Image (tube, grey):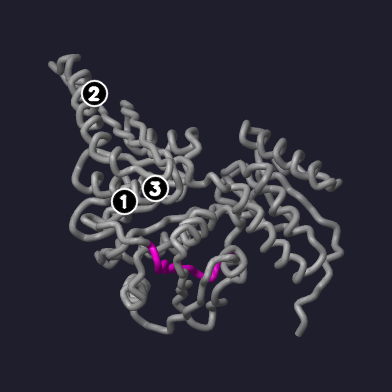
Amino acid sequence: MSKEKVYDAEPSIELLGIGSSKHRQMKANLQRALSELSLDIPIREITDIDELMRYEVAGIPALAVNGQVLFQQVVPSVEDLSIVLKVLLSGSVNQKEEMLRQAALTSLNQRGNLMKNILVPTDFSPNAENALLYAVEIANKFGSKITLLNTFKVYSSAGMFLSVESYMEKDAAQQMLDAMKQVEPMLRGGASIESKISRGEAVPVITGLAKTGDYGLIIMGTQGASGLKEVFTGSITNGVMKATQTPILAIPNEYAFRPIDTIVFAVDEEGISHPGITSALVKIARAFEAKVHVFHQDIGSRDDGIDPTVDIFLDGVGHSFHYELDEQNINESINSFVKDYQANLLCMVRRRRGFLEEVFHVSATTREVFNSPVPLLILHDEG
């Protein structure tokens, strides 16, 4: 049956919220995107609590187009809104797919500086040092600036001298200087490094800087001899993963950098909301000329397979699709696939109560460890 189908229903745009600053910013971005596209579509603002509940969103503000909730609790840029509106309001399914492809390529080109800035948190441990060495290799490939960030927190108690904080900061400064001296001779291709030392809790400091500093990637080490266990067990890495929209590259303990030639992209049956989600994956794959193997474990008759948007947003990168029909748990399936294909990078998408969260849930309840032997690139799709 042909996929060609014309959508001639009157388009609708609903802005869900209660007039917060984020709500107002989303409305302003939406109005600008509509204006740039020369679209005269009214924006229906929904503030009534009972009506908001009908949309079953996890938080506000949120945006729905033609009844489909696209963004929630985040303020999309004018660029991303323009891409999504062009796709969803086009005339046919075939046209939609072609426009999605073009939007993906346009977005990737416009995000050419995606790896311009890389944030590398450090506590000067061997694991953090290992992650920094890995970050140097990525920065050399893209000509990126690395920001090496150390955070410290002084917990006051009776009898504590004020000089303790000063001592901790001076100690951090010396260790930072030593780390900078070690890696500066390794930088090539326009890559550079700077340092920051900040007082405060690690997770909010890291995520706050990632948001305000225009970082395209956070590279962090994980602790312990169990690979990526710390990503899923309440560590700082896990806290950052849950609190940021910036892609995170988690480096297993003692993992030595190897050129990235094979990437496994483990996906569920959900689609990808916009091309910006996969931009980090696509740019890394292109830079290293890596092949991407898209892996999906079929869960039976209720499984819809791999959503077409995965194929669309990997356009321009060599990729193949693999379906696993296996009764073993998803952790074992992914690890087996990574080893079989000798991959040196694993990529997954984190959603609110989605695939990556389910992997964590299984690990936590069964006391198993998701111990991928290779670095894990975490993308975020809250749309």
Q: Nearer the viewer, mark 3 or mark 1?
A: 3
Q: Which residue type does callout 3 highlight?
A: Asn
Near mark 1 (Cα within 10 A), the count class, few <14, some 14-19 or many ≥20, is: many
Q: Which mark is residue 169?
A: 2
Residue 245 at what x, y percent from top left? 49, 46
Q: Which mark is residue 365?
A: none
- Mark sitting earlier along the chain (3/1): 1
- Residue beneath the point at 59% across and 52% down: 57
Q: Which mark is residue 134?
A: 1
Near mark 3 (Cα within 10 A), the count class, few <14, some 14-19 or many ≥20, is: some
- Would you identify the image quadrant in which residue 331 lies? bottom left
Q: Nearer the viewer, mark 3 or mark 2?
A: 3
Left or right position of 278 against 184: right
Q: Which residue type does callout 2 highlight?
A: Glu
Q: Are marks 3 and 2 in contact (CB under 8 Å)?
A: no
Q: Are marks 2 and 1 in contact (CB under 8 Å)?
A: no
Confirm whether the magenta stretch covers residue 264.
Answer: yes
Element assignment for label 3: helix
Asked if one can make out residue 235 in the rendered structure from this viewpoint, the answer is: no
Near mark 2 (Cα within 10 A), the count class, few <14, some 14-19 or many ≥20, is: some
In front here: 154 or 53? 154
Q: CA distance from mark 3 to mark 2?
A: 29 Å
- Would you identify the image quadrant in which residue 104 lies? bottom right
Q: CA distance from mark 3 to mark 1?
A: 10 Å
Q: Nearer the viewer, mark 2 or mark 1?
A: 1
Taking the view exactly as shown, the residue that stands out farthest to the left is 159
- Mark sitting earlier along the chain (2/1): 1
Magenta residues span 260-271
Element assignment for label 1: helix
Mark 3 — residue?
140
Left or right position of 160 against 48: left
Q: Which residue type does callout 1 highlight?
A: Tyr
